[in-house]
């Protein structure tokens, strides 16, 4: 049976015109649509992909931004903006501005986001924010009015995205796929950090593993001044069966968990491995993980020894 996510993804993408994102040397994306449809999450995904992003840009400034992006010597080769009804002049000015922009050398891509009435009402209820067109009325009335007024702009769109059944992660993944023109997305960066508990746990740690249960080279005089990167320390630790058992179990868990983080769209993950001083056991385990996890797909490993 077809994967549920694939059905959602294909059902969400409606090609209004057969024009791919980013044709040419410059990419100029305009995101618009119904309030609460996910424009903020969409532009964050584009920002992660290296776009220069502007949220709630006044309509009259869109040509100025486009001119800056195409000016000779400009470094803004990928630009994404959000323009919507939060700006009072948007509804009356945008169609004219966009038609003029489309006739220029910029060749913009207009993406329209929408969702079902019930889902939009629920999202506004969860955030407790007023609808921009109904500050003194019900959210439902504002959504209905906005949908009617945006129909002419919706008809101009190159792409329409229905986010009704999409999670934040699925929406982000769709934008990554569209913006990369089908290319594989960037690897998740995994930071393996060894540390000593006596100096505190790293504040940016996502996962923390305590290896103080393993044999301690500190109590061997000839090893005390060495670190977990030295061969003698590695030999000492690996001759103990519990070290290999610990590594096997930890590696097995991480080989399962890391692809799940990649699937969720996480860009960075910090795995902290700690022992008492951060010199022997944590360093040795972090270096061993570097080797045992290097075959995991979609992951780029970095190792840092904070206290060694």
Image: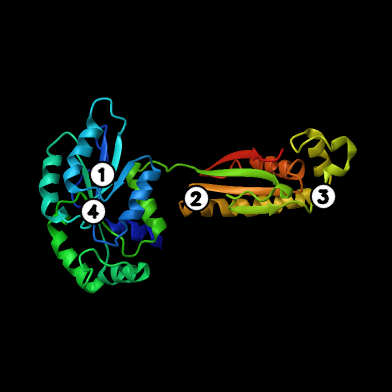
Q: Residue at x 35, y 46 (%)?
A: 46
Residue at point 35%, 52% (across, down): 174
- Residue 225 lies, in percent from the top left, at 82, 35
Q: Which of these two is toward me, 194 or 297?
A: 194
Q: Which mark is residue 176?
A: none
Marks 1 and 3, the one that precedes in the sequence: 1
Query: Circle 3 — which element?
Result: helix
Circle 1: element type: strand
Going from N to C along the chain, the mark reached first, 2 or 4, is 4
Q: Is residue 112 above or below residue 142?
A: above
Whether residue 122 is visible here, answered yes or no, is yes
- Label count reads 4
Q: Are marks 1 and 3 in contact (CB under 8 Å)?
A: no
Per the model, the C-alpha gap separating discs 1 and 3 is: 57 Å
Which element carries disc 2, helix, strand or loop?
Answer: helix
Q: Which residue is painted at 84% across and 42% down in the image?
A: 218
Checking the image for residue 262, the label placed there is 2
Crowding near pointer 4: few (<14 within 10 Å), some, many (20+)? many
Contact between labelled residues 2 and 3, with CB atoms less than 8 Å apart: no
Disc nearest the viewer among 1 and 3: 1
Along the viewing direction, whichever of 19 and 272 lies nearer the viewer: 272
Alpha carbon separation for disc pair 3 and 4? 59 Å
Foreground label between 3 and 4: 4
Task: Using the image as rendered, state which of residue 190 and residue 239 is in the foreground.
Answer: 190
* N-terminal-most mark, 3 or 4: 4
The location of residue 12, given as percent across then percent down, is 29, 58
Q: Which residue is mark 4?
A: 32
Q: What residue would you read off at disc 1?
A: 29
The Cα atoms of the two marked residues, 3 and 2, are separated by 32 Å
Name the foreground residue: 238 vs 34: 34
């Amino acid at each position: 049976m077809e994967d549920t996510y694939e059905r959602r993804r294909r059902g969400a993408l409606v090609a209004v015109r057969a024009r791919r994102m980013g044709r040419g040397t410059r990419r100029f994306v305009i995101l618009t649509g119904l309030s609460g449809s996910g424009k903020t999450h969409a532009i964050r995904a584009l920002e992660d992909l290296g776009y220069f992003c502007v949220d709630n840009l006044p309509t009259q400034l869109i040509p100025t931004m486009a001119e800056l992006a195409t000016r000779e010597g400009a470094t803004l080769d990928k630009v994404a903006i959000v323009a919507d009804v939060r700006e009072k002049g948007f509804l009356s000015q945008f169609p004219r501005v966009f038609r003029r922009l489309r006739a220029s050398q910029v060749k913009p891509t207009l993406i329209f986001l929408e969702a079902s009435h019930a889902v939009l009402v629920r999202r506004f209820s969860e955030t407790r924010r007023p609808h921009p067109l109904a500050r003194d009325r019900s959210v439902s009335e504002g959504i209905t009015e906005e949908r009617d007024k945006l129909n002419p702009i919706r008809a101009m769109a190159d792409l329409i995205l229905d986010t009704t059944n999409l999670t934040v992660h699925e929406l982000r993944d769709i934008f990554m796929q569209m913006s990369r023109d089908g290319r594989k997305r960037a690897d998740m960066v995994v930071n393996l950090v060894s540390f000593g508990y006596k100096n505190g746990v790293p504040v940016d740690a996502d996962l923390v593993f305590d290896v103080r249960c393993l044999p301690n080279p500190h109590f061997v005089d000839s090893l005390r001044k060495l670190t977990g990167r030295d061969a003698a320390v590695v030999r000492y630790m690996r001759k103990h069966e519990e070290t290999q058992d610990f590594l096997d179990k930890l590696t097995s868990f991480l080989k399962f968990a890391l692809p799940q983080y990649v699937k969720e769209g996480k860009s960075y993950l910090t795995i902290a491995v700690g022992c008492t001083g951060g010199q022997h056991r944590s360093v040795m385990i972090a270096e061993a993980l570097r080797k045992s996890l290097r075959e995991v797909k979609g992951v780029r490993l970095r190792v840092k020894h904070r206290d060694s």
